[in-house]
Amino acid sequence: MAELFLRACRGEPVERTPVWLLRQAGRYQPEYRALREKHSLLELIGTPELAAQVTMLPIDSFGLDAAIVFSDILPPLVGMGLELDFVKGDGPRIGNPIASPRDVDLLGAPPAEETLTATLEAIRIVRGELESRDVPVIGFAGAPFTLASYAIEGGTSKDFTRTKAFMLSEPAAWKRLLGKLVTVQADYLLAQATAGAQALQVFDSWAGRALGREDYLRYVAPHNRELYAKVAAAGVPVINFSLGVSAYLEDAAACGGDVVGLDWTLPLDEAWGRVGLDRPVQGNLDPASLLAPWRELAVRIDDVLERAGGRPGHVFNVGHGLTPGTPVDNVRRLVEHVHERTS
Ligand code: CP3
């Protein structure tokens, strides 16, 4: 199916709805768990051949319509001078989190070609392998607020108090921090497109969880707008996935990107109506649906498809990442079902 996903991203009519899944490569797959017995997450990400191998796992197993390069949103922080580790059972850890304006000024902004070579090389390898199979490769990066929250909190946070305290107490340093992150992320996304990524996704996982609308508009939206404006130069479709922004979805979508990635909290038709039916969307099955028995999962897949109504410009996806307990068989049946129902 030539470029089904890319055509849907441009809002063009397609023979059937393309489908890929957030965190489609990961711990729910026995092959991934076997690789993780031998290598740490950062080793997998830092070794182009291994990252390419993991990227291919769900493509070979399920016939998905797009591959997303295997990496994480946090490695770009390392090139900027932050110490990153993933601690078993505890998630990401930054050893030297940002605590003062001076820490912000000490951060570097080196080019991705120097610091993220493994991921760029993994994209080249995967593109080479998938070209003949007509499966496009997606590159990605984190949005500035989400990355700033890790850099300041030192890990995943529930309430983002340190981040918000810094944002409100040091507004000038906050601007410089998000500005540096925009520079680094825009450069990284453009480098991924140069390396062969045919679409780009920006993950803003935490701004919507952390901030009310007025703070989002004041402290985040200008930086996101700058990021999307810079990345438009890549000339490939850009997906704006902002999690938890139902309270101000229109504002988050207005920051930019060609396609709006919808989280699972609103019915797809309502969310699509709010961003505008002329804008392509991606989403938005609740990933927990894949933990249900097939008959319940099938009803929920059909619900998303019905709400999409066969309109051009829909990419089927989950509305947040697949969880480690997802049965492999449900992923296989989901992909088959979306393909059958929409062709
Ligand atoms: O989607 C894919 O298949 C590509 C790979 C991918 C990973 N992380 C691999 C990963 C992508 C796109 C991400 C993005 C990411 N990473 C986000 C944004 C999306 C979202 O979920 O909101 C965020 C916030 C992170 C940060 C992160 N990475 C956390 C909080 C954790 C720990 C929690 C967890 O799920 O374990 C990670 C680790 C991580 N990144 C894993 C994978 C497969 C699990 C690592 C392992 O093997 O132990």
Image: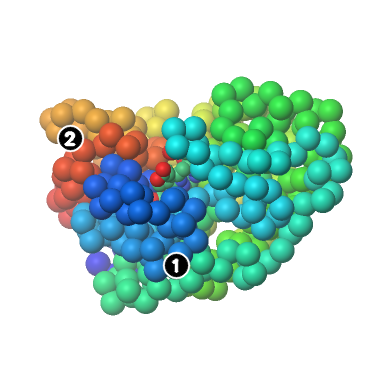
Q: Is mark 1 within 8 Å of ligand 1?
A: no
Q: Position of residue 86 (x, y in %)?
A: 51, 43
Residue at point 59% right, 35% down? 155
Please state if 39 lies on the left or on the right of 180 as rendered.
left
Please state if 111 lies on the left or on the right of 292 as rendered.
right
Please state if 107 lies on the left or on the right of 212 as rendered.
right
How busy is the neighbourhood of tag 1: few (under 14 within 10 Å), some, or many (20 plus)? many
Quadrant occupied by the N terminus:
bottom left
Q: Position of residue 220 (x, y in %)?
A: 70, 39
Residue carrying label 2: 298
Instruction: Give the distance between the C-alpha atoms of the residues marked 2 and 1, in whole angstroms.
Output: 36 Å
Residue carrying label 1: 48
Residue at point 71% right, 39% down? 97
Going from N to C along the chain, the mark reached first, 2 or 1, is: 1
Q: Position of residue 182 (x, y in %)?
A: 69, 53
Residue at point 66% right, 41% down? 95
| Amino acid type assigned to the residue bearing label 1 in the image | Pro
